[in-house]
Amino acid sequence: MTTLLAGPTQVALRPSFEGSNISFAIGFKHVNYLAEAAVLEHFRSAGLAPGVLYEKFGLGFDVVHLTTRLGSVIHGDDSVKCEVRPTTEDGDTTLGFAVTMSVDRDGRETKAVTSKVRVALRIDDHVKPAEPVPAELAAFAVPRLATAAPQPLTARPGTSLDLTTGRGTTGPDPVLDELVAGRNAFGWKWRVPYFYCHFSERMHMSGFLRVLEEVVDLFLAERGLPIRPVLHGRGWIPVVTRSEVELVDEVLMEEDLYTVYTVQDVFKDLLYTSTMDCYVVRDGNLVPVATGTITHGYMTEREANDWALVNFDEDALAALRGERAAQPAGVA
């Protein structure tokens, strides 16, 4: 285990105002951003800021695995105390960290979120390093984040996306049709823009978190549960209790990304778990690039910033199970 990053650190962070979408609660994506930011501060405290890693050693900082459990709502004005504890073990090829986030509630420190983060240091051949990689970091310096085995693909990709459509396509598309056939799933094809990428080349973890949020939004709309009508008609808003994303290959800027969102389990009438699988097509084969899971429920705001889980009604259950689309809810 490297001693350069061995000690635990603490930092107080505030969530981005952008993440306060419903009332003043912070959504899961920006909670995950806090986990990444806390680990970045851990690196900076050791003198290994991302700029130093990149410019001095030719290494890109890449989060390749991020699992988060949300136990309590984080508000937009919270000062979130983040404790980062290294978990890297001998023989690991990525750096591991456990992040605990706590907030003040009525004068009492309350644990709100726990995350597990793994970081790879990607060697960048386009940078001429000023110094050799330190020996303690050499085991985590990799020429590629991951390399997934290509899978055979019968369908041929459809025409290129119309770059004016913005959100891509949810079909019909030959590849998407093959990927979702016979499953309680939803498919989305989308072109990766440069602002989802870093180090001038590849999509990074925050981009996949944005994809996960987006595909959920598109899925719910397709199933008759679009956010705004459900929020204003039933007073429900989706809430995430757990999310996980892992990179299994690299995605390059402006590649077409195929995302499949599949409902796996509906637990009683409170929570449902889905998977996200992302692919690109290269040389006629399907290449997995990321996989993830997310567990959702619905909450309602009884009073300002006082939230409670609600039970799915039969209409919502049928939609989530793929039996039929939900009936439209009234919009205030």
Image (cartoon, helix red, strand yellow):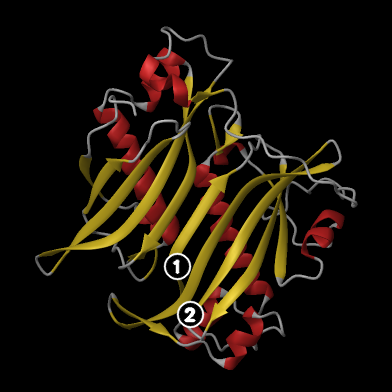
Q: Residue 262 at what x, y percent from top left?
A: 66, 66
**Which one is nearer the viewer's eye here, 297 or 166?**
297
Q: Which of marks 2 and 1 is nearer the N terminus?
A: 2
Relative horizontal placement of residue 65, taking residue 203 as reference (left or right): left
If the image is split into quadrants, where does the N terminus sit?
Answer: top left
Q: Residue 73 at what x, y percent from top left?
A: 31, 67
Q: Residues within 10 Å of mark 2 (few under 14, many from 20)?
A: many
**Which one is nearer the viewer's eye here, 104 or 291?**
291
The correct choice, above or below, for 189 with respect to 150 in the image is below
**Which one is nearer the viewer's eye here, 253 or 7?**
7
Name the residue beneath numbered marker 2. Answer: 231
Relative horizontal placement of residue 86, taking residue 109 as reference (left or right): right
Q: Nearer the viewer, mark 2 or mark 1?
A: 1
**Residue 124, image quadrant:** top right
Residue drawn at 53 percent across, 27 percent down? 199
Q: What residue type is labelled 2?
A: Leu
* Label number found at residue 315: none
Residue drawn at 38 percent across, 43 percent down? 36
Task: Look at the image and tell me whether residue 328 can be seen.
Answer: no
Residue reaching furthest front? 90
Q: What residue type is labelled 1?
A: Val
Task: Look at the image and tell me whether residue 126 can be seen.
Answer: yes
Name the residue beneath numbered marker 1. Answer: 240
Q: Residue 153 at what x, y percent from top left?
A: 86, 49
Tell me the element at label 2. Answer: helix
**Residue 224, image quadrant:** bottom right
Q: Residue 305 at what x, y percent from top left?
A: 28, 75
Residue drawn at 9 percent across, 65 percent down? 107
Q: Residues within 10 Å of mark 1 (few under 14, many from 20)?
A: many
Relative horizontal placement of residue 73, taking residue 171 as reference (left or right): left
Residue drawn at 70 percent across, 79 percent down? 322
Tell me the element at label 1. Answer: strand
